[in-house]
Image (tube, rainbow, N blue to C red):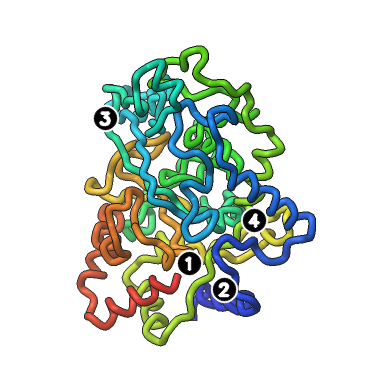
Amino acid sequence: MTRWWIALMAICVAAACRRLEPGDPVRGLSAAERAQFDSGRAVFDSVFTPEKGLGPLFNANGCKECHEDPAAGGTGDEVERHATAFHANAPPGSRMCDELAAQGGFVFQNHVTPLLHAALGIDSEPIPSAATAVGRRTTPEIFGFGLLDAVPDSEILAYADPDDRDHDGISGRPNRFFDGRLGRFGRKALVPTLREFNDGAFSAEIGITTPAVPTEETVAGTPIPPGTDPAPDPELSDHQAELATTFVRLLAPPEPLQMSREARQGRDVFIRVGCARCHRPVLTTGDSPIEALRYKKVAAYTDLLLHDMGPNLGDICLALATPTEFRTEPLMGLHLKKQFLHDGRASTAEQAVEMHGGEATKARDLFRALPAGDRAALLAFLKTL
């Protein structure tokens, strides 16, 4: 039995008390931490209006409008637009990826407030002609993100093999934020920390300014017209933003379902075909001021690194990530998902596996060649995650 499965068994034993439901906090919180979690949920559940800071450009009127299924922190049916410009032949010393920040990118909002519509006559933010690709993005579940935030950079970097020195065809590499820090959040692993991920979401998704992101989004690079934003900035205090982040930080990861004998067989097939080379079953958190997050084994099934997934899945670039590179999607909570891959193009886990390419081509082909029993077992295992 591998060390991964021993660690997973320990996680399952720890979870054998009361089963956590989606939207519950992690176990072991102090009374003060639980109170902060509940206060943060109130901010997360808030519905914003233009008078309270919504927009003028936005994708949703609150966190929970997108992250609602099966509970606060889950997924939703919203699909947003991201656009960038990729220059593969950029001169040495210049960046290949232009996130189009000067033109309103890289998130282009789907909705505008009535005041902005009246001023500009638009219903959504236009995508500039400079964009070389537009990517669709579904809403990710954010359960367990506090544990991912607590994984040390050193563990993520230990799995990186950008030059494929072990010749296994897998060459995961980290993405880096614009200031050089290691990224881990987002489908392209751009954002380094959970707080920054949330602050960015308040701005790009809801149009809410915070002390960390104090200015409004532009309309394709043009400042919003005077009189279209009635709420004074910042529209959310630092305390409120931190409470919302605390709520997300303390959301428990979805607990796996009980495994049948077939699913246990599929767990071994998962290893054998090479899925675990990117979807690493266990990550370990480091030190944390929150004891419930400190030095914990997490059944995350990710390495938080970028991998080339082939041209059929490619869309935008982002920082160091090329159009075909994506962060390994965590598989915790897979049994809750109704759509798969970054843009929701797959309606089942099996379809998602079939669409893998690039570094995952070998594993995909081994999956396709599996005897019917092994294939069914692997899919049964995935349905328990």
Question: Crowding at label 4, few (<14), some or many (≥20) Cα neighbours within 10 Å?
Answer: many
Cα–Cα gap, marks 4 and 1 = 21 Å
| Residue farthest bottom in this picture | 261
Q: Which residue is mark 1?
A: 281
- Give the Cα distance between marks 4 and 2: 21 Å
Identify which amino acid the numbered label 2 is placed on: Ala
In the rendered image, residue 332, in percent from the top left (x then y), is placed at 48, 64
User: Tag 2's secondary structure?
Assistant: helix
Task: Tell us which disc is closer to us: 2 or 3.
Answer: 3
Q: Earlier in the sequence, mark 2 or mark 1?
A: 2
Q: How many marks?
A: 4
- Residue beneath label 2, please? 7
Which of the marked residues, 4 or 3, is nearer the chain's N terminus?
3
Q: Secondary structure at mark 3?
A: loop
Q: Give the labeled residue for mark 4.
A: 250
As drawn, which residue projects farthest toward the left? 369
Choose mark 1 or mark 3, whichever is in front. Answer: 3
Residue at 40%, 87% (x, y): give it.
261
- Disc 2 to disc 3: CB gap under 8 Å: no
Image position, residue 170 (x, y; %): 35, 56
Badge 3: few (under 14), some or many (20 or more) residues near its Cα, within 10 Å?
A: some
The kind of residue on which mark 3 rests is Thr
In front: mark 4 or mark 3?
4
Q: Is residue 103 left or right of residue 129?
A: right
Q: Disc 4 marks which amino acid?
A: Leu
Instruction: Name the N-terminal-most of marks 2 and 3.
Output: 2
Looking at the image, do the residues carrying marks 2 and 1 touch, with CB atoms under 8 Å apart?
yes
Q: Secondary structure at mark 1?
A: loop
What residue does disc 3 label? 132
Which of the 4 image quarters holds residue 199?
top right
Front residue of 20/169: it is 20
Secondary structure under the numbered disc 4 in the rendered image:
loop
